[in-house]
Amino acid sequence: MKRSLGGLWDTWGITAILLLLLAVAPVLTPDFFSLDNAQSVLRESAYLGIVAAGMTFAIASGAFDLSVGGQLALCSVVSLMGFAAGGTVLAVAAALATGLACGLVNASLITRLAVPPFVATLGTLFVFRGVAYILTKDGPKTLPYDQIGSPFVKIGGLNVAGLPVPFLIMLAVYAAAWLLMRRTATGRRVLAYGSSPEAARFCGISPTRLRVFVFALVGVSVGIAALTYITRVWTADGSAQDGFELKVIAAVVLGGTSLKGGKGTLIGTFSAVLLVSVLNDMLVSEGVPSAYQRIVLGGVLIIALTIDGLRTRFAAPGSLRRAVTGLGGRTPKTGLAR
Amino acid sequence: MANSGRRALLEVEGLTVEFPGVRALDNVHFDVAAGEVHALVGENGAGKSTLLKVLGGLHRPSAGAIRLGGNAYRPRRPSDAMHAGIAVIYQEFNLYPDLSVAENVFSGREPFHRFSRGIRYAEINSRAAALFATLGVSIDPAAAVNSLTVSEQQLVEIAKALSVNGRIIVMDEPTAALSADEVARLLDVVRRLRAEGRSVIYVSHRLDEVFAVADRVTVLRDGKHVRTSPLAGTSTDELVRLMVGRDIASMFHRDDVADGDVVLELDRVSAGRQLREVSMTVRAGEIVGIGGVAGAGQPELSQVIFGAVPLKSGQMRLGGNAYRPKGPADAMKAGVGFLHEDRKTAGILPDLTVRHNLTISVLDKVRGALGRLLSPSAELDIFSTYRARLAIRTTGPDQLIGQLSGGNQQKVLFGRALAPGARLLILNEPTRGVDIGAKVEIHHLINEITADGAGVIMISSDLPELLGISDRVYVFASGQIVGHLTGDDRTEENVMLCATTGRKIFSEAAS
């Protein structure tokens, strides 16, 4: 089986860049591969990575979930309240149930009220954060110090065989997500729907069920991520992880998943998440101020998308003309229903 | 007659248009007098649209000359046609749905206020209202175009043509989507335009309209001029013969397949905007052709059987049992396969491989040992089976479907429709846009499918194909069956008569 160079780049390009970065990292940052530093990079990447796995499905289906930042804040706050009320079991259940509920709210806005995903989740981003603010109006929810010995509280800091537990959870999430995308009917339908919603409908794929699944999946991934997040930072309120949604989408797109839908690569997303974390870590160790870190991340994203855009633009027939003349944007439409 | 003794306003001589591998127009000549309604008729692919696009400045001829009012007319772009006073109203309207009627009429030529540079709305609204008054219709100039009916949108296009002082107004299938009342109103408008001294080139499949409104008619066939003559003294049958007038190619082959039990039965089925009270049957081993002018309810028919549009009223029975699919998934489970007429936007899954395009309809059957997980080897088996059976030319299972030729994409989609074990196959335009070789292969395949005992409904606007391989043909007009042709009644003339004149023909032997 031959595969085109372009196909290989789609899946492995970002991984290659990650490996390159890892190769030069020790030169720039001598203690990069010290156990402490490596563990910290992996631990930090977990909650971004877990949500990015769920988001890969949303984007592959041709949609977005802009509300994940609000969801993360809400799941974290509710989970912390759950822990205070009923310990580990309730904390875990509360995080997952809140994530699922958020996903279902998004899905019903999109499928029942026919609000486009972009608009629906932009709205719920504010709503979810707003609810988290209301729940923490008397101050942020925290993990109590007297529970420091509890296994739940330890999740964020614990290592098993030298690997941080949040990173292990992320690995498990990616293994499951990869199977779901590549080896299940549901995953295939997500890609089919993202590639052509109209054709997918005539293949017997129900748009409603598909969207409910995708947005519920994103919600649950946020629930899992919230557990690694609160056990790492021990506190949360409405402002937790402001701007998180854009980081997640950036990582997914950087990984090579097409914003047009129809393509999704979890290997790419995984590598992109690590790339962003490594880059961040290097910038921090070099003492680069955080404002500049943002600029670097934005620059990397723009460069990656430019390469991708140029490649797909020049791959399609007739596309050069469109690219040059700008035709194909707003065209007069017939009033006839087709 | 409007033409006699009067100097021609538009003269077309020796017009030839060539596309790579095709001569769309071959040495065509015709002329239009001032104040004449000139009809242009011919089958699909006869070259009517190409001729209109040359007049409208969209195509450039490879040979020939056009004169307008005695001067050479060589439009290089649509605006040239507009300035010369030729307004072409294509079937697909050129309207901005979110803008108002008046904004559309004066689009690109709006008068502005001197200082604010805002559009003079009062002025364009009153000018648009005046235009509609000359047409004898009332449409609110301030209404958004997307709030209008199709026939009103048509009138907006006509008003646009008048606003640039169009001397020649060209209408391409203007009544394709109109109701009977709306058609009558449109024909009135055409007569008014003629009374004002304007010329109209009227392109239509519907010969009854042509007879009702036109002075002269030009028949095109296979890109060539067949005849121009006054309509007075011409009969419908004569025109139909001139339009068809060719041997039905012997390339169409239909195997003898014994009919089996009734697979599908429709009893007064209505659905969508068009389909009304349609009753028909399809037997196992049968190819039932559906013909008629495009948009006469054929898409609704195929989609209601496939569960993609809801049934409004009536009954369907599949294999003797009551059948009312809740959606395409239901229909597929019941053994109905479907091929969409629009391969590009509703057929292929462009980002997926050939293998995945094939198996998308049978994902439930390619589960491996691990229960819910898909088995790549089972998918490969399906791919190999259909690649061999349908002779799909591809570099391998992982090639993207978009890289295949149209004919091979179509074969993959056939495989997708067949894979769930279909006992009824609905084929919409099965050979549209495929080359001649693939066309023969696809016809062979349809024969095979019926030999295996499935029933086939084939909707086709390609008359030789429709008649060449169908056992029986239903003809649709305005959402109803107006003809049922079996045996020797299956002729192009009969299909055209039913489809274009509303005459009804039901073969004796028809059940």
Image: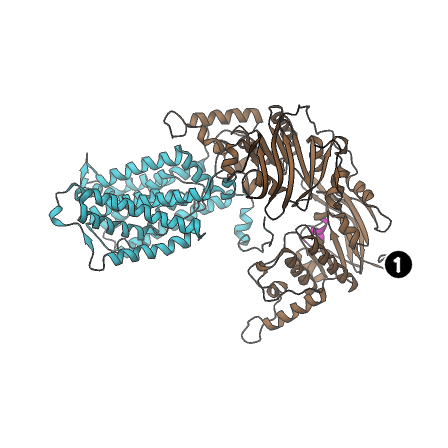
Chain colours: A cyan, B brown
| Main SS, magenta residues | helix
Foreground residue among B193 and A308:
B193
- Work out whether A29 lies above or below B380: below
Please state the horizontal and vertical placement of residue B93, each as a whole percent of the image.
63, 55
| Residue B171 placement (x, y as % from top left) | 71, 54
In the rendered structure, the answer to whether residue B74 lies left or right of residue B332 reads right
- Residue shown at 69%/27% (left/top)? B254
Task: State the image coordinates of residue B164 (x, y, percent, origin top left).
Answer: 69, 64
Badge 1 marks a residue whose secondary structure is loop
What is the chain identity of the residue bearing mark 1?
B
| Count of picture labels | 1
| Residue assigned mark 1 | B5
The image quarter containing residue A273 is top left
Indicate left or right for B201 with A35 as reference: right
Q: Which class describes the residues within 10 Å of circle 1: few (<14), some (14-19), or many (20+)?
A: few
State the residue lying farthest toward the bottom: B115
Q: Nearer the viewer, residue B176 or B300?
A: B300
| Amino acid type assigned to the residue bearing label 1 in the image | Gly
Rendered position, B349 above or below A104: above
The residue sitting at 33% across, 56% down in the picture is A127
Magenta residue span: B50-57
Can see residue B63? yes
Which of B421 and B15 lies nearest the eye of the viewer? B421
Out of B170 and A38, give the one closest to the viewer.
Answer: B170
Position of residue A270 in the picture relative to residue A309 (left or right): left
Seen as rendered, the residue at the extreme left is: A146
